[in-house]
Amino acid sequence: MENTMEKVKVAYIARASVPSTSTNSIHIAKITEAFAQISPEPVLIVSGGDESMSLLECYGIKDGYGIKRFRMPKKDRLHQILWAKKAVKEAGRLGATCIVTRDPFTAFFGVMKGYETVLDLHGDLAHLCGRFYRMIRWKFFAASPKFHPVFISKGLQDYYLKKYGLPREKSVVLPDACNLDDFEEYAIKEPALSGDSLHIGYFGKALVGKGIELIRRLAELDSDDLFDIYGATQQEAEKETGKAFSGNVVFHGRINNKEVPERMCDMDVLILPNQDKLRNEGEDIGKFTSPLKMFEYMASGRVIVASDLEVLREVIDDSFVYLADAGDENSWMKAINEIKKDRQLAKEKAVKAKEEARKYTWRARAGAMLSLTGQNYDR
């Protein structure tokens, strides 16, 4: 065993609330757990969170870590900058040698203070920090050997190359991830594809960009199957689409991430109906996104039907997923009929999807980030 004093100590800094019900918070909690598995005593520094909930209760986190919270009195740009500066200072006080963050301001102060800094980018810098996006062109920051940008998808990496001129060799692409252990207890059950009716599950928000309108039209077309929606209420879905849903759609509302593996494995088929345009907090991330639930779907060992989008094809293909036209419910109906027609092939695809998920674990993603910094960690 190496001397732990020589190993990296990670501070993950996120201007976010943890625990909370947001997808962003799930990503933060899971990747920090992965750092806890390979690096001594990582710390998570956040701006808020429900302190009455435990990480185990909310996310099923087993490998614990310390959390430090600095509340932001205001959410304007000045207070975002001041918060980032304070968080980096605290990371240093706690003995961190490496900072990982999704916040550009935090990355800037991390590099300026001499820390190995990984900036995990999921969207456009201009959306994240306004006119301060110019920092990506400041050579003393962007060209620093301490600065390590990571992109959630190749689509986003290409965008930065075209818009900001960030050299491709300066960055790496690391898609989102999953924790296979979370699903182990439930995924041993094969999808029940017998009978004429399938349980079709969707996990996510009731947004048109995430496909809730497509689901509405598909459920009307496919009256034989039952559609279970986790993550949204019927009221939210009908407000978003402006239309009523048929009786074969059952809304279960929000659930804690800890419950997700069991609920997914109760389904026969899981659907990922992302649209080409997907607005998230005012930004169109349709061509950039690497949906967390895509990897969880794969880990569940269920049959998957997904939108045939270029950004999703960075991870999935038709050898283990049924692909359908994102805008055409008839294409989705055809995929469902193919599953019913050849159930053995559908099961084989589900098994392969689960195997493919092994390429995308939180631990592997965390390790890849730390490898960029050139520091030692416990592999």
Image: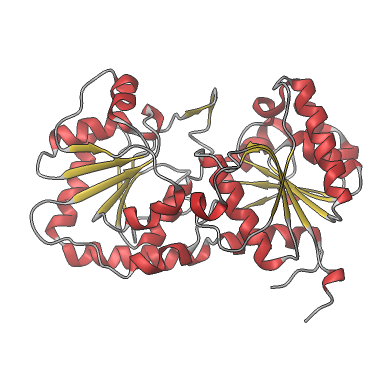
Foreground residue among 251 and 108: 251
Q: Against 44, is 41 above or below? A: below
Q: Which image quarter is the C terminus in?
A: bottom right
Q: Is residue 27 left or right of residue 139?
A: left
Residue 259 in picture, x, y percent from top left: 40, 52
Foreground residue among 76 and 132: 76
Foreground residue among 35 and 196: 35
**Residue under the image location 31 percent in, 63 percent down:** 350
Asked if one can make out residue 27 in the rendered structure from this viewpoint, the answer is: yes
**Residue under the image location 54 percent in, 22 percent down:** 282
**Residue under the image location 34 percent in, 63 percent down:** 301
Residue 305 in picture, x, y percent from top left: 30, 49
Q: Which image quarter is the N terminus in?
A: bottom right
Q: Can you tell which quarter of the image residue 328 is in? A: top left
Q: Against 274, is 200 above or below? A: below
Q: Is residue 55 left or right of residue 81?
A: left
Q: Against 44, is 159 above or below? A: above
Foreground residue among 321 and 94: 94
The colour scheme of the drawn protein is secondary structure
Q: Can you tell which quarter of the image residue 218 is in? A: top left
Q: Against 290, is 280 above or below? A: above
Q: Residue furthest bottom?
A: 1
For the image shown, how many numbered marks are present on the structure? 0
**Residue under the image location 21 percent in, 30 percent down:** 217
Residue 70 in picture, x, y percent from top left: 75, 36
Residue 335 in picture, x, y percent from top left: 21, 48
Asked if one can make out residue 145 in the rendered structure from this viewpoint, the answer is: no
